[in-house]
Amino acid sequence: MSIVGETILTVTIEMLVEKLISDVIQLFARQEQIQAALKDWKKKLRMIRAVLDEMKQSASNLYGFLKELKLTAAEAEIYIADRDPYKGSLKYYQRLSNRYDARNFDLAVGENQKKKPFIPIVCINLLRNAEGKSESILVQHFEESLNYVMLNQNRVKTLIDQEEEKLSLE
């Protein structure tokens, strides 16, 4: 019986050792696969972060542009009236001129003199000013608003001169 018991014990131990070795090898192989997958995921994560950073920067720039556009549209709406649609044109053009011109563009004329440059206001219609197009209506209104401003130019100069006098007295 001792031989039979010894044989059974040997066979059982061999089976257990083979099973353990097989499980260890499989576990090791699985760990290698997991490590490779983790490295791949790290690369993908870096790429995703770079794309997100770029999108964040683009969104910030776009948000600023849209904010400026919205502000300009709101200002334009304030100055447009139903009965006298061009009455606010001058004020609107003055605000545009003040915003984009007086801050940065003082030109030296002489040693002690400075002259503000004239910033022309231009209607850009992107070559779509054709008959039947909605842009032609905008161009027509733009031209009419400029005509209104030009007709009232003397009155405007007087108002501007009065404002300059107020500033110089202060």
Image (cartoon, rainbow, N blue to C red):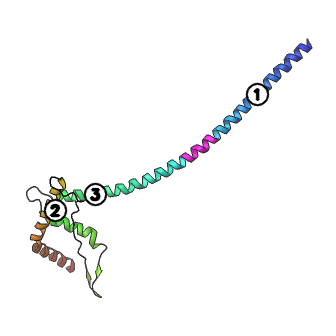
The secondary structure type at the circle numbered 3 is: helix
x, y (%) of residue 10? 86, 20
Q: Residue 69 carries which label?
A: 3
Q: Name the residue under label 1.
A: 20
In terms of image quadrants, where is residue 66?
bottom left
Kind of residue at disc 2: Phe
Q: Which mark is residue 125?
A: none
CB under 8 Å between callouts 2 and 3? no
**Residue 170 makes an appearance in the image:** no
Camera-side residue: 106 or 54? 54
Q: In this view, does 97 lie above or below 113?
A: above
From the viewer's perspective, tell me whether residue 115 is left or right of residue 48: left
C-alpha separation, residue under disc 1 versus residue under disc 2: 87 Å
Q: In this view, does 23 lie above or below 170?
A: above
Kind of residue at disc 1: Leu
| Bounds of the magenta segment | 36-44
Please tell me whether residue 64 belongs to the stretch shown in magenta: no
Quadrant showing the C terminus = bottom left
The secondary structure type at the circle numbered 1 is: helix
From the viewer's perspective, tell me whether residue 124 is left or right of residue 150: right
x, y (%) of residue 143? 14, 64
Mark 1 or 2, nearer chain start: 1
Q: Mark 2 points at which residue?
A: 142
Residue ID at (83%, 19%): 11
